[in-house]
Amino acid sequence: MFSGIDTAEDFNEPVFVIAEDASPAHAVHKAMKTMAEIKKLPQREERTMPEMLKYLGWCSWDAFYQKVNAKGLEEKAEELRDKNIPVKWFLIDDGWLDVEGKKLKALEPDKNKFPEGFLPVTERIRNMGSVEYFGVWHAVCGYWEGLTDDNTAGCDEFLYRTKDGNLYPSPINGEGFYRKWYKYLKKEGISFVKVDGQSTVANFFKDNIPASQAAEGIANAIENAAELMDRNVINCMGMAMETITARKLTGVSRNSDDFVPSRGPAGFKEHLLQNAYNSLYHNDIYTCDWDMFWTAQEDASQHALLRAASGGPVYFSDRVGETNPEAIRPLIYKDGKLLMLERSLMPADDCVFTDPLKEGILKMHNYGYTGKRITGAMALFNMTEEEQTFHASVEDIPELDRSREYVIYDWHSQTILNECTGTMKPGEYGWYLFAPKGKHMASFGRSDKYAGFTAVDDWQEYDDHDAITIHEAGPVCWYSEHAVKSAEIAGKDVTSLLKEENGLYLLNLEETGSQIEITVRW
């Protein structure tokens, strides 16, 4: 516990919440809900997710690092167009700013990297194909150490000089600084911002302004100014508690340290663990951002599955020429829209107090809707050096109705299981669906998508047939103990396209981008 002010002698404020429950996840939820009530903090369901983040994105960071420039962005856009990868948004990460050392000099981009500014570049890329939105990265107080004394921002009245002589946006009236910056960026074709290093605010204003007051002042300034961009913000590196409790308006927050492609499999394990366990409490307040990934790495399919199951934004950061479309296809529709689950992926209760690097299988769960029915999903990873046994069930997923009957589907092997048990070798992983059984069938929706069950927009049951509306045509599968008499789409008989094995039916339709209704007769 700290105040950030050495001379503080007394205070009157709650400092912790204790909660008890048989379920670790429920105990965390009780504590976070109580904290949110004390701090008058909106919970996740009361916040909004920026519309563009519901679509596939790309980030410049691991592609260019601080050498990002206009030419490179256009080359990447050309590659994505040529590969028919429907990226909807670009994030221009660190490297675009006009800085001196670790301090910001100007609100405009570096003239050597973006000699025309942003607008001509964003317009050319928009004209190439699917990219519609552009965002830029900036550190919470401008750049990593604030602003230079001779900066050209023209916002002196909105800045605060600390006792040690550093210059930062003011926690008292700094909104004017961010508002001027965002107004300029919006004119340059920028639609959103990623604000990094938010938990450093307490350090910047140490012995000047109390930590919570400084964090809340800066957060209010950013969120109010971001009104100019419909509050389209990705909050980043802001999981210190005084920062989590400071943000009242924006809805998306990074859930881990950076994805670092150079670290390979070891980096994947660390990234997975951080995201899994942070979600236990972070999900109560925010849509959790599991960060970017590379589609061409050896562990790309594992990263892709995690992003599909994360319930948050999905974006990659491959260098020019290196994006693998096949790693992305199972996550999106043809227009780049994500097949999203309802919350963040979280560890099962029996994994919360074990070390998945040493024993057992890390089990993580989420859920989504198949029509109006809830389907559960489990991602399992063996992160140890030995073969491990596993067991997962309906009881592991709190949103599932224990009174219903569910069919278990192994997504990778495309088989039906009597129970979700087995063994996994080191490095192996699995994706299992728990689909509710209806009168005649259990639907898994699009068989080629990780969260394909969410592609079922509507599911109506009748005495002798089911009518299933699929958001976008493509291969569809379901399980039934009843023999199918026929299948039709818009009055056309497609029964000949059906393949059946042990009650699992696959209707192998071409991916068209159009909604369809399938009538299955029994």
Image (spheres, rainbow, N blue to C red):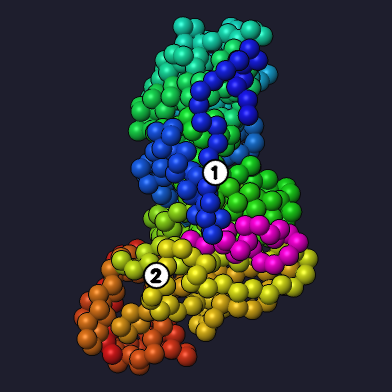
Q: Which residue is mark 2?
A: 401
Q: Is residue 8 left or right of residue 270?
A: left
Kind of residue sitting beneath label 2 = Asp
The residues tagged by marks 2 and 1 sit, at their Cα atoms, a distance apart of 28 Å
Does the CB distance between marks 2 and 1 fall below 8 Å?
no
Q: Residues within 10 Å of mark 2 (few under 14, many from 20)?
A: some
Q: How many marks?
A: 2
81, 468: nearer the viewer? 468
Q: Which residues are magenta?
A: 347-366
Rendered residue at 60%/15% (across/down): 8
Height in image: 426 above or below 45?
below
Residue 410 x/y as whole percent: 53, 76
Rendered residue at 41%/42% (across/down): 43
Q: Does any portion of residue 142 appear in the rendered image?
A: no
Q: Quadrant of the C terminus?
A: bottom left
Q: Is residue 178 left or right of residue 11?
A: left
Q: Does any portion of residue 368 appear in the rendered image?
A: yes
What element does badge 2 sit on? loop
Q: Which residue is mark 1?
A: 18
Residue 199 x/y as whole percent: 59, 30
